[in-house]
Amino acid sequence: MLATLTRPFAARPAAKPGKLARHVTPTGVERKLGEDEIIVSKTDLKGRITYGNEVFVRISGFEEETLLGAPHSILRHPDMPRAVFKLLWDTIAAGEEIFAYVVNLSRNGDHYWVFAHVTPSFDARGKIVGYHSNRRMPRPEALAKVRPLYAALLAAERAEKDRRLGLERSSELLHRTLRDAGMAYDEFVFSL
């Protein structure tokens, strides 16, 4: 399995149209990483998966052929605030790393929480050519503090009929929360 995952992305055919259409209902069942397990994935600049390790394939429940070339958002859980993803993408697109708590959705609707470290990948000239993420099991006491914040962010997003306005409201709440705590997002997540 790993040998296929490490072949260059350019050597693979593009994903078949319609292959990624997902209408999965969350099961409420949580999958957990082992304490020593690390999920590793890489994407291109548009967030399409170019590499994933065996732990990534196993916990996501997708076949590697489905994952490779697919948008990383294939794993997006409906309870994950878009404001956090916006912050994440804005940060890495600016060439900086970020740490974040993320809840993902497996193929069958199970979910799994991770503590992610996401970094841009640079070429020899310093140009961003993709992104790299290592994810590990989060500490339960940190999740106990993250879940209420994410629920509040989601409520702000969903209170607006217009998705763009909902994202703005949620982002405002996230930034206000960080300002009130006197911390950047990375500092906040490490303080939990």
Image (cartoon, rainbow, N blue to C red):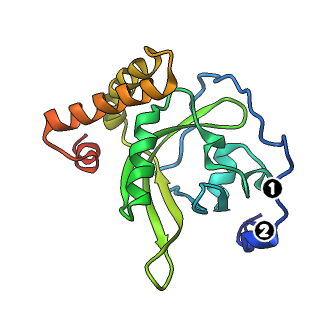
Q: In the rendered image of this protein, does residue 30 appear above or below residue 115?
A: above
In this view of the protein, which residue sits in the foreground, 42 or 26? 42
Q: Is residue 87 above or below residue 155?
A: below
Measured as percent of width and height from the top left, residue 109 is found at 67, 29
Say above or below: 159 vs 130: above
Residue 148 falls left or right of residue 81: left
Per the rendering, the mark at residue 65 is: 1
Q: Residue furthest bottom?
A: 124
Residue 151 as seen in the image, left or right of residue 111: left
**Residue identified by numbered label 2:** 4
> At x 52% / y 48%, what residue is drawn?
34
Question: In percent of the image, x 64 and y 31: which residue is there?
Answer: 110
The quarter of the image holding the C terminus is: top left
Cβ–Cβ under 8 Å for marks 1 and 2: yes
The label number, if any, that marks residue 121 in the structure image: none
Q: CA distance from mark 1 to mark 2?
A: 9 Å
Q: Is residue 151 left or right of residue 172?
A: right
Front-most of 98 and 93?
A: 93
Of mark 1 and mark 2, the one earlier in the sequence is 2
Query: Which x, y percent locates residue 151?
Result: 39, 22
- The foreground one among 53 and 31 is 53
Where, quadrant-wise, is the N terminus in this rendering?
bottom right
